[in-house]
Amino acid sequence: MRIFKILTFIIVLLGGAYAASMYYFVDESKNFTIEKEIDYPVDKVFSQFNNLQNFTRWNNFFTSSQSIDIDYYTPYEGQGSAISYVDPKNNTDGEMFIRYENLNKTLKYQLFEDENENPTLVDVKFKPVSAEKTKIIWYVHTPKLSVWKRVENFWTEDRFAENINKSMTNLKNSLGNKVEKDNQMAAIKYDSLMVENEENKLLLGINVSTSNKKDALYKNIVMNYNKAYNFVTMDMGKRDDEFGYPILITDADNYKDKEVSYFLGIPLSKRIGVSDNNFNFRSVNPSQNYVIYYKGNYEGRIRAIQQLIQKAKKDEMRFGDIRQTFIERPMEGQDVNMKLSLSVYK
């Protein structure tokens, strides 16, 4: 009994000492600032922060968990937009709101975590350093914590900084893919024959043989594109900014055949395990290509392909496959927007 009283006294003494030290020496909330620079213009950067669907695709707080479930609420973008999230595996949930927006300059967020009624306040300012560089400044104010929980403030800033570092890497990759696609679109000159050197690519796709009767081929392409796209986005969980434009590879002159064989694939950055035997990886080696951008009905591509073949023959070049890169997703009943590439060599 005496030992129990002594242990109780020691526990109470230690608890009191802990509470006193937390009360007098540790702030009940924290304020800190974090600055980063990124090599993209302010308008492109800002749109990744004020659109919460974009925001959750690169912010490490959300991307680091495979079990998190997010709901988005209108208006989805800018002041008044909001999300709620639940992560059963990590036993966390919360809500985030954009309370204020000054376009391309300032955003004010409120983040309610778990059952805490007091939010974390995060003001983010965007400052153009140059036409192609933006400084991002986070001003963070954490909620007040009770004496017993105040120890968490020792690692709050480090945890927040680590999340921003990982998020910035994700953001750079995301913007890199978006800007590359924007630049490709801006550089297009339709119906002009060009020479390009293409780097190696890794495609995940499907091998197909189908009829070349009127409209049958294109309908088959649309169907198999949808299969590949759904597999990459739904089964593999890839986002649109994580892969490139779909590419169809086939013999250059098989447009004359009654049956056409082709490979339709989506470019990915690396090989990963694939559970569906209908899909496989295909490596595309670096090559020199004769290129034409074409827009119109799918049948009209034949004339553009013939131009590429005639150019190769005139230059006494041998040629291999024709690659059809769909700059806009192929859809039944609509014109195509594509890049036709004929690989050539001596």
Image (cartoon, grey):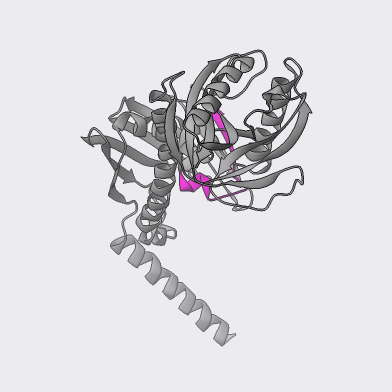
User: Residue 85: where, in percent of width, then height?
Assistant: 56, 39
Q: Image height check: is 329 above or below 236?
A: above
Q: Image height check: is 176 above or below 273?
A: above
**301 to the left or right of 21:** right
Seen at 30% across and 28% down, the residue is 104
Seen at 53% across and 25% down, the residue is 310
Front in this rendered view, residue 19 or 36: 36
Q: Quadrant of residue 239?
A: top right
User: Residue 136: where, in percent of width, then height?
Assistant: 29, 41
Q: Is residue 327 visible?
A: no
Front in this rendered view, residue 9 or 278: 278
Q: Is residue 77 visible?
A: yes
| 69 is within the stretch colored magenta | yes
Q: Image height check: is 12 above or below 195?
A: below
**3 to the left or right of 212:** left
Q: Residue furthest left?
A: 129
Q: Count the numbered circles shown.
A: 0
Q: Quadrant of residue 235?
A: top right
User: Residue 254: where, in percent of width, then height?
Assistant: 68, 28
Quadrant containing the N terminus is bottom right
Query: Which residues make up the magenta segment?
Result: 59-72
Q: Residue furthest bottom?
A: 2
| 137 is within the stretch colored magenta | no
